[in-house]
Amino acid sequence: MISYCINYFNPNNSDCNRKGNIEIIINRLKKASNNHDFEILWNNDSSSDKEEFDKCMKDIKGNVFYSNNKGEFAAYNLLFKHAQGDYIVTLQDDDIPSDYNWMDECIHLFKKYKNVGLIGLKNGGSIMHFCPVKIKEFPEARKLRWPDGNEDAKIFYAGWLNTGPFIFKKKALKKIGYFDESFKIPNNPFTSTDADIVVQAWLKDIHVLKYKLNKDFERGVGGHGSKINENVRKLRVDGLLNSFKCYWVKNIKYKETIEKKIKELNEKDFKNISIKDRKE
């Protein structure tokens, strides 16, 4: 069985209204799960749109949990505890899944590469790579720019992933130990939590793949969750910088060992891609 875990937050303002995403996401997940039993677990972090959830989830196995700004990774941890599937997928409420049975591709990879316990499907790596200005403010973070495969490659072992979406084997997730909630930044959706759980997987000898689907998700549907002005932007920059620092303290000592393992595995299993260190 597949468990889809989705954190939903809809402030329903002029910049963001994701109510219409609920039915679309459910219908797309039906296609993704063709030939597989599945459940959909939602954490409604804004406690909104209850009538829409009641209507759309009426004939779907799963549940909707209502909370008040719990935060993305704490929400995932809550849903993980209720997930019954052999495969657990983290999804975001502004990402519309691809319109075909992409889960078959991922399950095939888990079966082919027996030591893989986590697959990331989002192009672009970790949030670290989207925010080079933070690197300039915190030079030590350069040391955490892991070697990956060529970004144009379809598949490679990775030291960085972005959580939208992650696909875990349930047994691997339990061994890893869920997301570290100490990385949470108040009122900031960006943390290093997704990068951290990748490191924790490698430390448990659980291999991590980055895979490019034949057809990517639609991103940013329904608008941003909060209005961005200069004050909010500065708070998010400062919060993300602090999150990087926490990540650095926790994980820098493991970099050399994991880096070596990733390079060796990429050269062994995916000789057709080039291995590179990330640059500014």
Image (spheres, rainbow, N blue to C red):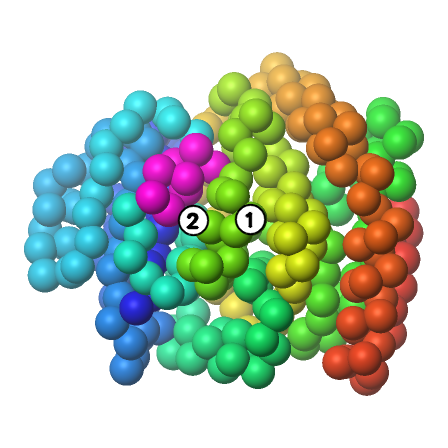
Q: Nearer the viewer, mark 2 or mark 1?
A: 1
Quadrant for residue 233, please give it.
top right
| Residue that label 2 marks | 92
Q: Could you tell me residue 14's position as x and y percent? A: 36, 32
Q: Answer with the quarter of the image where residue 95 lies.
A: bottom left
- The boundaries of the magenta stretch are 73-81
Residue holding disc 1: 176
- Give the residue drawn at x 89%, y 41%: 143
Looking at the rendered structure, the kind of residue marked 1 is: Ile
Q: Is residue 277 above or below residue 18?
A: below
- Nearest to the observer: residue 180 or residue 21: 180
Q: Residues within 10 Å of mark 1 (few under 14, many from 20)?
A: many
Q: Secondary structure at mark 1?
A: helix
- The answer to which of marks 2 and 1 sits earlier in the sequence is 2
Q: Amino acid at mark 2?
A: Gln
Side (left or right) of 13 relative to 89: left
Give the quarter of the image for residue 191.
top right
Main SS category, magenta section: helix
Residue 205, magenta (yes or no):
no
Residue displayed at 23% across by 32% down: 66
Picture coordinates of residue 271, whole percent (x, y): 82, 83
